[in-house]
Image (cartoon, grey):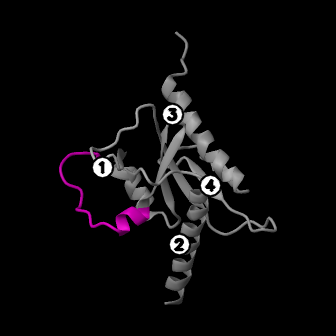
Amino acid sequence: MRKRRTRQHVIADLSVNHVERLVLRCGWTVERVRHDYGLDLIMRTYSGNGAIQSGSVWFQLKATEHLPTLRDNRTIPIRVEWGDLLLWLNEPMPVVLVVYDAMEDKAYWLHVQEYFRERSWAARTGMTNTISLRVPVINVLDEAAVRLFARFRDECLLRSVRSKRA
């Protein structure tokens, strides 16, 4: 019996392509993480004269054909593994969770560290290995959002410099 390329494989590749195109349109680069342990892509930016800039932005992609929304139609619930979440929260550079809707060829994003900076959350309880995050439907992934991610990276670098001086 031969291995098969499933629809899930196809939409996963479409989600990568969707992010790559937006980053490339900004004049920057994106690399696929070969060994995926909770992060899929890394974005690098360049100055106006083409010099590489410090820092990076990490992406974790989730792809679906049936985009779930909560009753309020304002948020998309996404379940993630606790281990992945802990990795993302301890990453010094921004981690952006991207939810790709294959039927609409549209993606939504959540800046993971900022999401938890703005919320108090209880320690892990029970026997569950996952947690549900809520991605706002107003966070449409487009070129403006990609440029915003570079500003998130700049803020992380600035915080790092400030903490070294303190």
The answer for how far apart the CA atoms under marks 2 and 4 are is 20 Å
Residue numbers of the magenta segment: 113-132
Q: What element carries label 2?
A: helix
The answer for how far apart the CA atoms under marks 3 and 4 are is 18 Å
Residue corresponding to mark 2: 156
Residue type at tag 2? Cys
Q: What element carries label 3?
A: loop
Residue that extends furthest to the top in the rendered view of this protein: 1
- In x, y percent, where is residue 59? 53, 52
Residue 143 circle label:
4
Relative placement, left or right, of 135 versus 52 is: left
Residue 131 circle label:
1
Q: Which of the pair 13/135 is nearer the observer?
A: 135
Relative placement, left or right, of 120 versus 23 is: left
- In x, y percent, where is residue 24? 70, 51
Relative placement, left or right, of 101 versus 68 is: right
The answer for how far apart the CA atoms under marks 1 and 4 are is 29 Å
Q: Which of the pair 69/127 is nearer the observer?
A: 69
Q: Is residue 61 covered in magenta? A: no
The answer for how far apart the CA atoms under marks 3 and 1 are is 23 Å
Residue corresponding to mark 3: 102
Residue type at tag 1? Ile
Residue type at tag 4? Glu
In the image, which is nearer the foreground, mark 2 or mark 4?
A: 4
Q: Is mark 1 on a helix, strand or loop?
A: strand
